[in-house]
Image (spheres, helix red, strand yellow):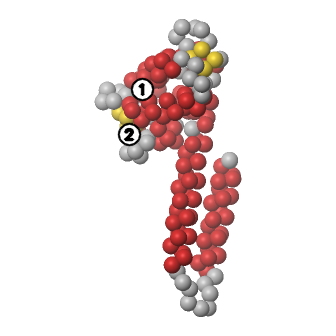
Amino acid sequence: MTIQFKHTAITIEILLFALVFSAPAFPLDTSDLSDFKDDMSGTMSSIKGMKEKLDTVGYESELFAKGMMKRIDTDDNRIISSAEYMNYLGEIFDTLDANIDNAIDKKEWGSNKANDALKKITTNSYRQKLRKMPTMEAMDADKDQIVSRDEFVDFHQAVLEKIDKKGNGIKY
């Protein structure tokens, strides 16, 4: 997927280069170029958004790996309910939120103390995916470099709804 995005970006760069350096010998009506520029800007934003989503795919797969599911399933019925899922993620958020201000900044996200505490409640592979900056950036809806409790919950609620489409729990 990364190669495809790079290929698309290179293709766009080549087209822009060709457009700029193949100026016609007659006056050019540039009113159409502003529309093209707006279209290209929207395309690049879409590509960036898709890349951010792809960066979190590994995170989602680790969140729903069997080792993590066993940790989330508190009643051992082999079904993860919405309440179990959100309670567990609340515990993860609280572990990351070292200064207890209902927000996680980059320092807290990457702290060794949080990593040590997460070792007790997560799998190694999940913890590695969670602590990557693209995961934090995907959760940071307002892009202020801080993940609030609401942003953390909203992100994970969307992940749950994507996996548990019927709303009757996730079987493992």
Number of labels in the image equals 2
Instruction: Name the residue: 60% across, 20% down.
Output: 170
Instruction: Name the residue: 47% across, 26% down.
Output: 115
Mark number for residue 75?
A: none
Instruction: Name the residue: 64% across, 70% down.
Output: 15
Classify 92 as above or below 78.
below
Quick one: label 2, few (<14), some, or many (20+) residues within 10 Å? many
Question: Does residue 117 appear in the picture of this structure?
Answer: no
Quick one: label 1, few (<14), some, or many (20+) residues within 10 Å? many
Residue position for label 2? 146
SS at mark 2 in the image: strand
Rendered location of residue 62, percent (x, y): 60, 28
Rendered location of residue 108, percent (x, y): 39, 33
Classify 27 as above or below 93.
below
Rendered location of residue 169, percent (x, y): 58, 19
Residue position for label 1? 93
Classify 124 as above or below 75.
below
